[in-house]
Structures are given as structure tokens and as C-alpha cells.
Image (tube, grey):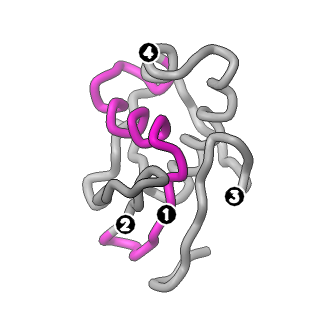
Amino acid sequence: MGCAGSTDRVTADGPTLAPPSFDASRPWRLHPQVALRDEAFGALAYHYGNRRLVFLRSPALVELVRSLEHFDSAEAALAATVGERRRHGYREALARLAASEVLDAR
């Protein structure tokens, strides 16, 4: 799906990758081989293992991703950081990030 020059866009507003099976009741974290670089639009996530570059196109999504390791589940992180009406979109964004190996199940 990705190579050294590929980019995937991940937003909370709409899918750009087909969301995989994602269990939001499990604890998640930023993958240990991923570095986030803050940008005006959100952040760039670079995975040193698979060389994938992913755009996180929302500062709120970046905040959510960074907070995941502090919660017992992705659902708990969503409840603490995202309004109820917007959680579905963010849940899908987390699923796409997991598929891109930006997130790692703990």
C-alpha cells in the first residue's frame, strides 16, 4: 500500500483508506517507530519501519493520538477529548491510523 514516497491523508471528516477492524475498547498508543512533527494543519507522522508518511489533518486528531497512551481504551480517550457528535469520524480516523501502523495496540 505504501512505499518510501507514498503519502496517506487521514482526517476525521472522511475516509481516504478503507477502515479496518478496529477495537476501540482496547488500549492503543502511537507506534514506537513513529515520529510526529507538528504542522499548521495538524502533524506529519513518519514510520521509521515501513517508511510511510501520513498526514494527520486536524490538530484535534493529533491531540487525540498523543493522549491515547494515557487511557485504558481508545473509547475512553475519545470520550475525554472529542465531542459526542464527532466521535464516529475520529474513531474511523483512528482505525485508518491503526491500518497504517501509526497506532499500536498495547
Q: Residue at x 45, y 21 (%)?
A: 81
Q: Is residue 14 left or right of residue 39?
A: right
Which circle's residue, 1 or 2, is located before the other in the chain?
A: 2
- Residue at the disc numbered 4: 80
* Residue 50 on the magenta segment: yes
Crowd rating for badge 2 (residues with CA inside 10 Å; few <14, some 14–19, many 20+): some
Where's residue 2, x and y in %?
55, 76
Look at the numbered discs 1 and 2 and tell me whether their residues touch, using CB distance below 8 Å.
Answer: yes
Quarter of the picture containing the C terminus is: top left
Marker disc for residue 46: 2
Which residue range is magenta in the image?
Answer: 48-75
Measured in 3D between alpha carbons, the distance from the residue under mark 1 to the one under mark 4, in whole angstroms, is: 24 Å
Q: Amino acid at mark 3?
A: Leu
- Residue at the disc numbered 3: 17
Which circle's residue, 2 or 3, is located before the other in the chain?
A: 3
95 or 83, which is in the foreground?
A: 83
57, above or below 81, in the image: below
Crowd rating for badge 4 (residues with CA inside 10 Å; few <14, some 14–19, many 20+): few
Secondary structure under badge 1? strand
